[in-house]
Amino acid sequence: MIAATQIYKIISILLQYPSKDLVENWKEIKQFSTELPTLKAEDKALIIAFIDWASSLSLTKLQAEYVNNFDMTAENSLYLTYHLFDEQDRERGPALIELAELYKSTGFEIGDGELPDYLPLILEYVSTMEEQASALSFLQQTSQAASIIATNLKKNESPYAPLVRIVECHGHVADIAS
């Protein structure tokens, strides 16, 4: 049986810089997305629509879209603390350290050079959680920054906006459940 938290692994993969491996596996990613048992039909449709859009582009064009959406526009940054703290805010560093320590304490390893607040990394971490309630509770802490990013992406008519909006909405589900 597929774990309910696997949706976050899929979104994590889709929000990372596109690679040849991604492009070679569109069919499998789409199939896996359609088989997620607890995913709402609306979320499934958004993910499938994104995959259909992204898979219609060459790798080079998809990479250019990614760079245009995330690297050229700071307000779309996928680093959550960027949206919660001013770049010079003294609280940003300790927040990053605290998140890195949380990962370390659970045995989750982050790659060299990656900041722990990178949304795809956070989603990958959440996908390792066995309980949906724990995942939603963790996502609740990301919903404010995810909302900012999703709003900015939507304003720029980015095809990535629905993916980030799903993350935001799942964080708000935790608000309602608590």
Image (tube, rainbow, N blue to C red):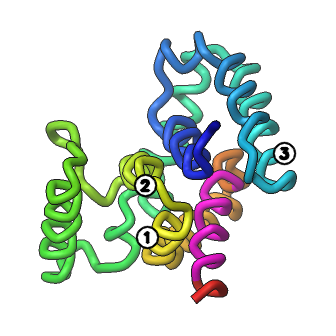
Question: Pointer 1: what residue?
Answer: 138
Question: Pointer 3: what residue?
Answer: 45
* Amino acid bearing label 1: Phe
The percent position of residue 8, horizontal first and vertical second, equals: 54, 49
Whether residue 145 appears in this view of the structure is no
Dot 2 or dot 1: first in sequence order is: 2
The percent position of residue 137, horizontal first and vertical second, equals: 48, 74
Q: State the SS at label 2.
A: loop
As drawn, the residue found furthest toward the front would be 1
Q: Residue at x 18, y 82 (%)?
A: 91
**Quarter of the image containing the C terminus?**
bottom right
Tell me whether the residue at label 3 lies in contact with that at label 2, contact meaning CB atoms closer than 8 angstroms: no
Crowding near the residue tagged with mark 1, few <14, some 14–19, many ≥20 C-alpha atoms within 10 Å: some
Crowding near the residue tagged with mark 2, few <14, some 14–19, many ≥20 C-alpha atoms within 10 Å: some
- Which labelled disc corresponds to residue 13? none
Q: State the SS at label 1.
A: helix
Question: Pointer 2: what residue?
Answer: 129
Q: Residue at x 65, y 51 (%)?
A: 163
Q: Which residues are magenta?
A: 162-174
